[in-house]
Amino acid sequence: MALKQVSSNKCFEGFQKVFEHDSTELKCKMKFGIYLPPKAETGKCPVLYWLSGLTCTEQNFITKAGFHQAAAEHGLIVVAPDTSPRGCNIEGEDESWDFGTGAGFYVDATEDPWKTNYRMYSYIKDELPKLINANFPTDPERMSVFGHSMGGHGALIFALKNPGKYKSVSAFAPICNPIQCQWGKKAFGGYLGSDTSKWEAYDATQLVKSCPDSHLDFLIDQGKDDQFLSAGQLLPDNFIAACTERKIPVVFRLQQGYDHSYFFIATFINDHIKHHAKYLNA
């Protein structure tokens, strides 16, 4: 599958690049950011996948999070895909910021008119890693996942639905229980239909209740002044309660004074890179 380089910038002796490709899952052109640390010039590196939140493209994380120095030091390739298919000419795809374009919710849609293109779950789980492993100096056995908000939801469900695939998982302000919040109800209703039992397959709080004994070590950072926490969109307490019941360890850090923005992410990103490096470089 042909990759077209869109940009390349030297950063902490490595390179932050953006590529475009034709996606077979999403049936459109997709972009992703990839940071290649200096170590990638001489050997294979583990891969850390970042999943972004609502309205984001591949650009938000690579320009705002300030992760490059830590990724360079720990020898991690970091991949930041887009958050939805683009330009599919589906009626209604650009009507709201929390559904359609920029809001793929990391599910495989089953409903018309979304089911042909909106297959972000399969894209992130299968197509993208195959593409990355075929074109870059990766160690395919060593991969991890993290994300923010809608992407934090994505990171949690990818780790929970695929035991053993990811060495570690972490999240910033994840949507922990989408079947119980307005964002989730809107997205899942549109992509997955009205049968709410089908929604549970993409809900981290539900998945924890039935997942096989997890060897995952969850790290979650949440800003205490996050407007979406107080609005009941994120519901971390539900996820923590489900984990506690199953005796699954979670490090949940409520960070005083921080909101939902990339300023919050940038503050704690090094802790998350270190968390993943511990497992990826073990």
Image: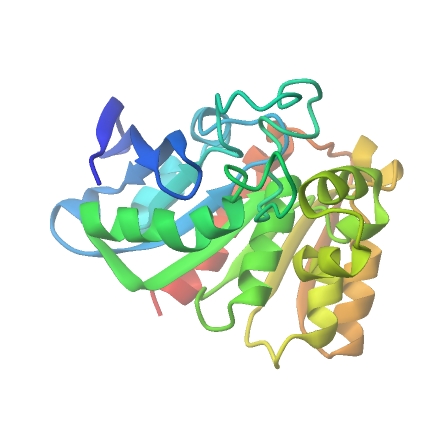
Query: In the image, residue 257 lies at what x, y percent?
Result: 78, 34
Left or right: residue 106 versus residue 240 is: left
Residue displayed at 80% across by 77% down = 245
Quarter in which the C terminus is drawn: bottom left
Q: Is residue 215 at all visible to an observer of this figure?
A: yes
Q: Position of residue 159 (x, y in %)?
A: 54, 62
Q: In which quarter of the image is residue 28?
A: top left
Q: In this view, does 209 lie to the left or right of 266?
A: right
Quarter of the image for the N terminus: give it. top left
Colour scheme:
rainbow
Q: Quadrant of residue 143?
A: bottom left
Residue 272, given in percent of the width and then of the height, sits at 52, 50
Is residue 234 placed above or below 43 in the rendered structure? above
Q: In this view, does 50 lie above or below 201?
A: above
Please say if 263 is above or below 282: above
For the residue pair 8 and 118, the one nearer the viewer reads as 118
